[in-house]
Amino acid sequence: MQQTRLNTLLDRLGAGLQEQLKNPWRRLATLSIAVLFGMFLGLAVSSSAGQLGYLDIVASTVVAIASEIISALFYGDRWKLRQTLFGEMLNALKFGLLYGLFLIAFLLGS
């Protein structure tokens, strides 16, 4: 690939962001934001699918398949996502999503 100004800028931006996220407190804050955003997504999926009564099965199928794919990628040995911040954030997002769905289920008593 050619070394253009845009490529150089993006490389420096990525390196600077990676350097900033080596701090354990910033990493913990990033992961907690991912969990909270996952909880928000869980609440949004359940409320938007619940408004249109016929999308419940489709939404639950999509969430279950996405959750299994993320688990297979994270816990599998092929891509080594456990060692990257992106993989940890994706797994935290999955936990938040499923936790938000469980909260709504307990809230509704179903």
Image: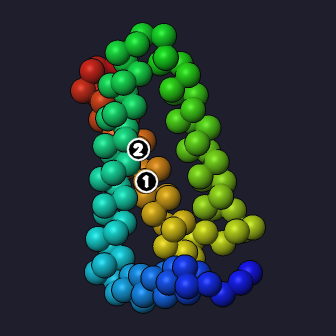
Estimate the x, y position of residue 25 in percent, counting from the top left. Answer: 28, 81
Looking at the rendered structure, the kind of residue marked 1 is Leu
Looking at the rendered structure, the kind of residue marked 2 is Leu
Would you say residue 105 is visible in this rendering? no
Which residue sits furthest left? 107
Q: Which colour scheme is used?
A: rainbow
Q: Which residue is nearer to you in this view: 58 or 98?
A: 58
Q: Is mark 1 on a helix, strand or loop?
A: helix
The reply, left or right, for residue 79 in relation to residue 88 is: right
Residue that label 2 marks: 97
Name which residue lies at 55% across and 75% down. Answer: 84
User: Quadrant of the rendered structure where residue 6 is?
Assistant: bottom right
Q: In which quarter of the image is the N terminus?
A: bottom right
- Binning the other alpha carbons within 10 Å of mark 2 as few (below 14), some (14 to 19) or many (20 upward) gives many
Determine whether 30 is above or below 68 in the image.
below
Q: Which residue is nearer to you in this view: 31 or 102?
A: 31
Question: Residues at badges 2 and 1 in contact (C-beta under 8 Å)?
Answer: yes
The reply, left or right, for residue 106 in relation to residue 84 is: left
Estimate the x, y position of residue 26 in percent, counting from the top left. Answer: 31, 78
As drawn, the label of residue 93 is 1
Q: Which residue is nearer to you in this view: 10 or 106?
A: 10
Determine whether 48 is above or below 41 in the image.
above
User: Quadrant of the rendered structure where residue 77 is?
Assistant: bottom right
Estimate the x, y position of residue 98 in percent, counting from the top left. Answer: 42, 42
Name which residue lies at 69% across and 62% down. Answer: 76
CA gap between label 2 and label 1 equals 6 Å
Name which residue lies at 30% across and 53% down. Answer: 36
Determine whether 73 is above or below 51 in the image.
below
